Every structure is written in structure tokens, then in C-alpha cells.
Image (spheres, coloured by chain):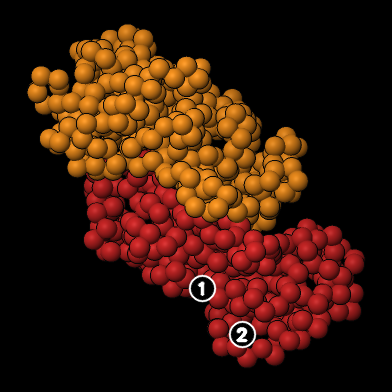
Chain colours: A red, B orange
Amino acid sequence: MSSLESDVFRWLQSRGLWTQTRDSNPNVVVGPGDDAAVLARPTGDVVVSTDMLSDDVDFLLAEAKPELVGRKALGVNLSDLAAMAATPIGFTASVAVDKNWSKPAYGNLSCLNYLKRLCEGMLTLADEFNCPLIGGDTNCFSGPLTISITVFGVIPHNSQGRKKYVPWTRNAAQPGDAILLTGAVGGSIHGRQFTFTPRVNEALYLRQNYDVHAAMDISDGLSLDLFRMTTASNVGAALDLDSIPIHRDVKKTHDDKSPLEHALSDGEDFELILTASPKTAEKILCDETLRSLGAKIARIGTVVNQPGLWTADGKEIAPDGWLH
Amino acid sequence: MSSLESDVFRWLQSRGLWTQTRDSNPNVVVGPGDDAAVLARPTGDVVVSTDMLSDDVDFLLAEAKPELVGRKALGVNLSDLAAMAATPIGFTASVAVDKNWSKPAYGNLSCLNYLKRLCEGMLTLADEFNCPLIGGDTNCFSGPLTISITVFGVIPHNSQGRKKYVPWTRNAAQPGDAILLTGAVGGSIHGRQFTFTPRVNEALYLRQNYDVHAAMDISDGLSLDLFRMTTASNVGAALDLDSIPIHRDVKKTHDDKSPLEHALSDGEDFELILTASPKTAEKILCDETLRSLGAKIARIGTVVNQPGLWTADGKEIAPDGWLH
């Protein structure tokens, strides 16, 4: 443990958010400070997602507040858990910072203060979803600030140990399924790429109440990610382009693209694409409890046999999005 | 998924080591290629360890073979699992490479070929310990090659769901305990820092057959890590310096330090420090099955009430090691 890591560790301990015993958090048997963390065996499958973010790629250190960088780093991982219908139970975070971390290299902030604020943003979101930080690793190197997060979730089984829920996957869309979308898409670059709320609550409510066939979160763009989902399922999608909820942030971008094009391709929306039978979809669309969780859900199309993305009148749509 | 990530993913699929179904690996319900991986619920606690390695810090890209870099990146994490007495069940790996990855930036190798060889080293070690790669993330940035691994293990429960084993921790050393060490220490810089075998097999055998009190792996140096263990346990250690197995590699270093000083401080040995009652320790030292697993085990001292590290005749030893 380097001096920097000790400093961060002590600060986190003083912040009181790390839990060392099963008494304070039933999921954490051994928390930070040992060689590894131990999660109590939950009654269910363990779901793991990992994502690394770097300055100049996933955020601009010079422009984004450290709290928002931390929030995003965890948020993109929680969004992946939501896309699998998993309940978050904990995460680990590794960071690599410039080896000259003792000099104020991060704007006006010392590196330690930068990391504190980054953790603050991360942990505030973690609290919201009851997902404790259970371990991590701090490194100094000669590169841009880099954060690697691994998040864990569970798909609970029922008391007999038989499966109650199954993880949602992207390869289970069936011809005839309705295609649903949470929230509105496009223009995330104007701030929502940092402030989005991962659709964990919506996913867990849907898992409990409806038979969802396939699911995926949008990181690279609605059309590109939907194309990936339908390709994985060996099907295609007929989109009702008029029904796609376009986020008002799209208007803040002034370029040659139409609002619809932005909605289809901007990416970093971290909304969920879901498919379900038309009957189930109808019930989902009318579910007032679900609506009260935050995200409106819209039906944007239908799964079809013919691979590819199509308009309602049979024109092919080229998948477009942002390749990280 | 970037083009590079697709390339790596395809290569890994063609290599046949990733398993997509519960049929081919009972631990993996959903393997790579979806938003997150799903591990089957094992009957036991889930253990998680994470460690990030970078060029110029943990290895020298210009000098180390990519296979060895990959082996080390996983090995240090498996060593952490061994230190907790956890059975490895899977790992995720994130890598960040130079954004100009399409140019041959890694010696004579293209970046893709470098990553293939890196994965080869990683997966060969993974196979040895039946620990499948279950997910990951590839990133391009303007920094040195960086690898972040998170490894998962389990501490099994017995069939009634009651605890059979408990994770070893570093805070459970008791006054009067014998202090045991696997293998020999010092001089790892001459190659063993890459080629070491994590003491997983030894740990699992010990877990099954003996009551080990405290355990920790040596990453930063025997004296420094033993000091950390005794500090975490609110005890001290009286070392029998003559009994410390000094690795023959120490002789390859020519400097002012004595062989013993190297053994106490070199670090990256990835051997295990263990404590157990003197009676248990005696049985462990005579266990021929254990010896056949690879590592010789030696008794190097005794846990004492007085905090700190001490020689047999009561002189204090300053903890010394390598701070990453």
C-alpha cells in the first residue's frame, strides 16, 4: 500500500462508508484492508461487470468535475448490471494516477483531493443503489488518470434453491416481440453522460413483475446497440421512428445531423433496450408503479425475422454510433 | 466494442477457452460477449481481489515477454486469493493500450499480437488453476500499457449451508503462534517476479486439513508484510533469522545488502506467511502431501505480544520493503 493509497484508505475509513463486519453490511464478510474482499454467499447467481475509464477518452479531466467522473465510472457499470436484471451488491475500484501525484497536477487540486472528490461522487451513487465499495487498488504511473471498476450483482433464487429469475441477455429477442426503451435518447454529451441514473430500479421492478426476453443498455448509440442485440438474437428490428423519444438536449447540438439521427447514434445514454411479447409490453407501458420509478418507457418498434434495422415501410437503417 | 476489442474477442473465441454455457463450465452461466458475466451461485462466500499493473511500474514492456506480463497480472491476483484460502472460480481483465495501437508500438509486435501473447500467458496460468476469464474491457488511451484484473474465488460451505471454512485474514495471528513461510524469499527481480506460482494449491490443502489462524501473501517484502500482518493482529513477531529460507537468486544481486537483508525486503516473492498454533505448525511441517504440492514450508518465528518485529535475542528489526 503506497502512502497515497494509505491516505485514501484512511480518508474512506473516516468517511464511514466502508463496512468491516457482517453486522454493518450482511454482504461484506471482509471489507477493504486485507488481501481480498469477501462477499457473503447470496442465494443467487453472482453477476460481474467491469469497465475502465480514462482521461481524454471517457471524460476530460480539465472540464469534468471529479465527482461526476467518479459517478460516471460507477454508473456505466451499474447500467450493465441493470441490463442483466441483477441486484447490485458491491464493487471494487482501481485507479492509476500520475506518478508525480504529490504535485498539484489536477487543476487546482492535489491528487489526493482529486481522488477524494472522485470517490465522493462514486460513493454517493453507490449509496443510492446500496452497492458498497468492497476493495480496490491505487497505482502511480506515467499516464492519464484511469479508473477501472468491477461491480457485482446477484440474480436471486427462490428459497428451494431453484431459479426464480434468470439474467436478461441480449441474445433472447424473439420475432414479434415489442421493442421497448426507457427514457429519451440523444445529446448526452451536454451533461447526461455524467449525470444519468442507471436504470437499476426499473430493471429490478421489471424482473419481479414481467417476462422480459432480451435486454441491453445503450452505451454506443441506440441504433448500434439495438443492431448488436438483434444480431446476437439472429433477428432484426422494424423501428417506428416517430415513436423514438428524442431528448431535449439534442437541440443543444448544432450540426448537420437531424434530431432523430442524434437520437439514433449519439450514445452514452445508458438507457435500456428491452424486448417482450406484445401483451407483456402493453402491460409494461400502462404500469403506473413502473412509471413512478423515474423512466418513462416507450415502444419503439418490433422484432422481425429479417436481420438488420428497418423502418416501418421497409427501408434499411444503417447502425450508427460511437465506438469507444 | 472497438475494432481492437472485437479482434481480441474473436481471437479468444477461436482459442476456445471462453465458455458460453453452463454445460462447458458449471461456474459460468453467461460468459463474455454480453453486458456482464454471470457466475453460478457457488455454495460459499465469494472472494474478490483486484490489482492493476502498468508498464514502467510493475514490468518493463521493453524487457518482459508479453506472456510473462500476462502471467504476472493474473498471478498477483491469484496469490491474493491463496492468502484468503479461496478457491479461484474466474476473473475479469481490463487493458488500456496506446491509442495508436494500429501502429507497431510494442517492440516488433502489433498491439493486437502483443495482447494475444499477453492473454496467452494469462490463460495458461488460468488453466492451471481452473480459473476462467469471464469478462473484460479493452481501452485505448495515451498512457503506458495498463492491465486491471479482478479475480473471484469462493470459500465453500458445507451441505447444510453452515460454514465449513472461513477466509484467512491478516488480523488473526495469536501470541504463541508459529510463523510459517512457503518457499524461499529474495531476489525475485531476477525473474521470479514473473514466473512465480501462486500458492493456491498449498492454501487449499491447508484450508482443508489444518486450522490456520492468519495469512498474507508477500508482495512488498517479508519483513514489511509480516509487520503489516502483526500490526493488523495487534501482536508482534520474534523471527528466527537463521531459519528464513533465502532464495538462491539473491546471489545474482551484487550490492551492499546482505543475502538476509534481501530476503527480508526484496518483495514480489508471492509466498505466503501463515500463523498457526505450534502443534498445528509441527504437523504442517511434517506433512508429506503438502510438500509434494511444490512449496517447502519453514517455521521462521513466533508471534509475540510485543508489537514490532524482533530477533530471537530481542533486537528490533525495522520493517523494510518495496512500496509500489
In which quadrant is the N terminus of chain A drawn?
Answer: top left
> Residue drawn at (48%, 45%), measured in percent from left and top?
B164
Tag of residue A136: none
In which quadrant is the C terminus of chain A drawn?
Answer: bottom right
Q: Are marks 1 and 2 in contact (CB under 8 Å)?
A: no
Would you identify the image quadrant in which residue B232 lies?
A: top left
Residue ID for mark 2? A290
Q: Is residue B146 above or below residue A312?
A: above
Q: CA distance from mark 1 to mark 2?
A: 18 Å
Q: Nearer the viewer, residue B228 or B178?
A: B178
Residue ID for mark 1? A196
Q: Nearer the viewer, residue A47 or A56?
A: A47
Instruction: Give the x, y percent position of residue A55.
Output: 44, 54
Q: Tag 1, which chain? A: A
Local secondary structure at mark 1: loop
Is residue A41 shown to the viewer in this render? yes
Q: Tag 2, which chain? A: A
Is residue A109 shown to the viewer in this render? no
Q: Confirm whether circles 1 and 2 share one chain.
A: yes
Would you identify the image quadrant in which residue A178 lies?
A: bottom right
Instruction: Give the x, y percent position of residue A124.
Output: 38, 70
> Residue drawn at (57%, 61%), measured in percent from left and top?
A43
- Horizontally, residue A167 falls left or right of residue B315, namely right
- Amino acid type at circle 1 is Phe
